[in-house]
Structure formats: C-alpha cells, structure tokens
Amino acid sequence: MFQAPRGTADHLPEEQKYWRYIESKAMEVAARFGFGRIDTPAFEDSNLFIRSVGEGTDIVEKEMYTFEDRGGDSVTLRPEGTAPVCRAYLEHGMHNLPQPVRMYYFCPVFRYERPQAGRFRQHHQFGVEVLGDADPSVDAEVIEVAWDLMTSLGLKNINLLINSVGDPQCRPAYVEKLRDYYSGHRAILCPDCTTRLERNPLRLLDCKVETCHALGNDAPRSADNLCEECNNHWDKLRQYLDSMELPYQIDHRMVRGLDYYTRTVFEVQPVDGGGQSTICGGGRYDGLITELGGRETPGIGFATGIERLTLNLKSGEVPVPDEPSPRYLVANVGDNARIAALELSVRLRRAGVGAILSSGARGLRGQMRQANALNIPYALILGDDEIEKGEVVVRDMESSVQESKPLEKFIEEASKSHAKGD
C-alpha cells in the first residue's frame, strides 16, 4: 500500500478548519495593512536561491530539492518565499509602482531535512514582504503585522524577540570577532559548527547542540558591534516599537539562517518552546534585490508555517470555528420519491443552501442515522403523500420534532434564512 512520502502529510477534512481559520485571519490582517496577494511558481531557476540564500547555508548545501529538467535546466523546488517575490518584483518592473510595494503570499515550501514535530519536508507558509523603503518605521510595521496575526489567532504565552545583525559595512568585523571567539573552543564544537566556523559563523549562535548553545552565552553580540547607520536604525526601531507598545524582548543570539538578512531580525516563539519551535521569523534584507541584478532596493518581511501555527492552536486549546456543513439531508421514502428528493437537493443548493442527498439504498431509519452521523441539524423527508400534496416533512434531528410544510414556501424561507446568515 502506498503512503505519503516521508516528511510530508495529508491534511484531512477534519484538519481543514484550522487551515481556513489561519488563512482567513491572515488575509484579514494583510488587508488591514494594505498588502496585496502574490503567487509565484513552485519551482525556480536554481541560481535564484544559490545567489539569494547563500552557498554556505544549510539550505543550499543540504536541503534544496534541485534537479535537471528535460530541457537541461537546473531548477529547484521553492525552499523559501522571499527570493521568488523579489524575482517577481524585478521581472515585472514593480519598482515603477508607488513604493513601498506590500505583498503577501501562501505557498508550499520544500526542504530536505530531518522530519520532526512541526517540521516537514513539504510545509506551507504565509508570508509578507515590503519592498522599497528602508525606514525603521517599516520594520516596526512589519513586526506589528506578525504580532497582530499571532494575537488575532488567539495565541497566548508567546514572546516577540528582536535583534540587529548589522549590514555588509559592519558585519564582517563582527563575524571575525565571532570566529576568533569560537576558534578558542573548537575542540568542543559539534561537526556542523566546525564547518560553520569557516563558512557561516553567524549560524554558530543558532546551534541547538547543548555544548555549542552554551558557548553562545558569552559570545560577542552583534548589537554591540554595529556601525553608526545600523546603530541609528536599531535605536529608532526600538523607539517605534516602544511607542506602539509592542512587548518585544532583545535576543542577542538571534540570527537568521539565510545570508541575505541585514539589520533587523525578529521571531515569535512560544514562551516554553525556545528557538526550535519558532512560530514566525523574518527580518530586513536590503541587499537582496541588488544581489539578484536589480538596483538598490530595501526590503523586509516574515514567514510563518501553517502546520506550526496549527500545532500551537491545538496545544493552546484555542477555539476554532467548524467549517460550514450542510444544513439539510434530503431523505426519501420509497424509490418513487428518489427523483423528487434529488430535485429538492438541487434547488436548495442552487439557492445557496447547503443540502445533501441521502444514500438511496437505505431505509428511512438508516437515512436518519446518516443525518445524525454527519451532524446535520435537519432532515427533509419526501414520500408519495408529500409529493402529491406539494409538501415536505422537516425533522429537527436534535429534538425529533417534525412538521409538514408547503414545499415552495419552505424553499423560499430556507433561501431567505441563508441570505441573512441564520
């Protein structure tokens, strides 16, 4: 028997209420902040991610799904959402639009990594990107979008963490300080960090191995090694966040896993979860558009995983509304009434009213059991007598009370009730 590939999951009908809830809240928040939706292809030219994410990153070296297509081109399944949006910004001349350009997206993301709770080889993201404005007030606004989404979903016991990782002017000197510090502890570094020490020292701060993690407590801090411009940006950001009364904390260990981040980085984490259970992460990437061949264009954004959000909604016992379900099950007594039952189902649905036709091979008692099993509140019963009189029997499945109503009047009332949202 076939099974879903390792690291992937089927999202069954009973799970969909969480997905629709998250999507609806995300779209509400995005609209409130003036974001428009963008959808990009599931795969891109591999060089897009090599140039943007960075050759020394775990994503490029270990996690990307890269293959040669039948035309001989190297393509990669999307491992993250920002680079494709930036590519679209360049390709479609969005720099000619009023700046900044605000976009949001929902997309599947593919990374070959070790599956674990809340982490999949295919997962789904909601993300936002703002391109064309370098002011720290934009950083504060994007952070507000993330926090607003988390709180509007009903998540509690979460922390908002921020840091600054500098820019290409001041970061190299800071990276050398990091390398010097960790070189003195090379003997106790894990194998991955031994490699990171040479190729991507910032990621040393993000290691979850206990010995490496402990070293980060006394490591040099990026926010203490900023150039004047980055320091001014950092100071203004915190002033804005203070004035907005956002409950942020500074996390000097925070870095991002992608090379393109500059200055502001931030995350939302569960209070008891730590970095491995991060719900949302993002930051500024002012050099990315230039790296992809465009003119200098600042940018900032974040992404959050739908699967991870679902886990947190469940663990936090957040009440999530059920998906809309049919209001009526149309039952028939005897085979002769089957066509009339089908016609009634069709008329109700075309009027916008949820209705399903019962399984025809069952007797009336079996059809009532079907309505109960599907949690349908009302059964509509048609038999020869009802057809002859132009009536329908309406049965309340909870109270078992039933009454006959003129068919045309019932359809009119059901349509009006649906239109009012009853």
Image: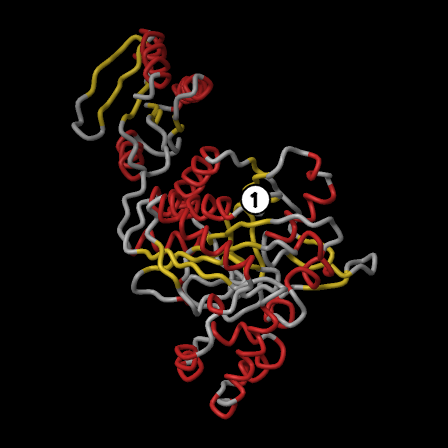
Residue 323: tell me if it is visible: yes
Say which quadrant the C terminus sits in: top left
Give the amino acid at mark 1: Val
Describe residue 164's horizontal placement relative to residue 294 as left or right.
left
Residue 20, image x, y percentages: 42, 40
Q: Is residue 201 above or below residue 182?
A: above
In the image, 185 versus 188, the foreground residue is 185
Q: Is residue 361 above or below residue 144?
A: above
Residue 1: tell me if it is visible: no
Residue 380, image x, y percentages: 31, 22
Q: Residue at x 56, y 57 (%)?
A: 229
Q: Secondary structure at mark 1?
A: strand
Most extreme residue toward the front, as rendered? 228
* Label 1: how many Cα within 10 Å (few below 14, some 14–19, many 20+): many
Q: Residue at x 55, y 54 (%)?
A: 284
Q: On the image, which quarter does residue 395 sit in?
A: top left
Residue 304, image x, y percentages: 47, 52
Q: How many marks?
A: 1
Q: Residue at x 17, y 22 (%)?
A: 401
Q: Is residue 237 above or below residue 353?
A: below
Q: On the image, which quarter does residue 353 sit in?
A: top left
Q: Residue at x 31, y 49 (%)?
A: 155
Q: On the image, which quarter does residue 152 sit in?
A: top left
Q: Which residue is mark 1?
A: 130
In the image, 357 versus 221, the foreground residue is 221
Residue 394, image x, y percentages: 26, 19
Most extreme residue toward the bottom, as rendered? 187
- Way the structure is coloured: secondary structure
